[in-house]
Amino acid sequence: MIYKETADSALAALGSLNKRLQKIYKYHHQDLLEVDAYINKIKKLLQEIKEIVPEGQKRLFGEG
């Protein structure tokens, strides 16, 4: 199912971004601009997921 594949792919990307953010925070506390850039990417991905996922599937993301 295309929606599940899209959601799985997006969630994998979010997991990868989360690991990167943890590494940045651990080793580069002062590098807040890079952290902000990744946070903005996460927000954009989440918005794209919400637009792609059909209404019945939104409850998976805490909206139903």
Image (cartoon, helix red, strand yellow):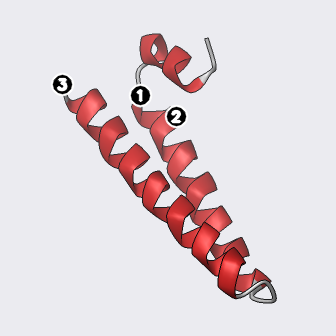
* Label whose residue precedes the other's in the sequence (3 or 1): 3
Cα–Cα span, label 3 and label 1: 11 Å
Vertical arrangement, residue 29 with respect to residue 2, above or below: below
Q: Residues within 10 Å of mark 3 (few under 14, many from 20)?
A: few
Mark 2 is on which residue type? Answer: Lys
Vertical arrangement, residue 49 with respect to residue 63, above or below: below
Is residue 37 rendered to the left or right of residue 6?
right
Coordinates of residue 5 in the picture (x, y in percent): 24, 36
Is residue 57 rendered to the left or right of residue 25?
left
Q: Quadrant of the N terminus?
A: top left
Q: What element carries label 1?
A: loop
Badge 3 vs badge 2, beta-carbon distance below 8 Å: no
Q: Which residue is drawn at 46% across and 39% down?
A: 49
Q: Is mark 2 on a helix, strand or loop?
A: helix
Badge 1 vs badge 2, beta-carbon distance below 8 Å: yes
Mark 3 is on which residue type? Answer: Met
Cα–Cα span, label 3 and label 2: 16 Å
Cα–Cα span, label 1 and label 2: 5 Å
Mark 1 is on which residue type? Answer: Val
Residue that badge 2 annotates: 50
Q: Residue at x 40, y 56 (%)?
A: 13
Is residue 15 rendered to the left or right of residue 34?
left
Q: What element carries label 3?
A: loop
Residue that badge 3 annotates: 1
Coordinates of residue 55 in the picture (x, y in percent): 48, 15
Q: How crowded is mark 2: few (under 14 residues within 10 Å), some or many (20 or more)?
A: some
Q: Which residue is drawn at 78% across and 83% down?
A: 29
Coordinates of residue 46 in the picture (x, y in percent): 55, 45
Coordinates of residue 8 in the picture (x, y in percent): 32, 39
Residue that badge 1 annotates: 53
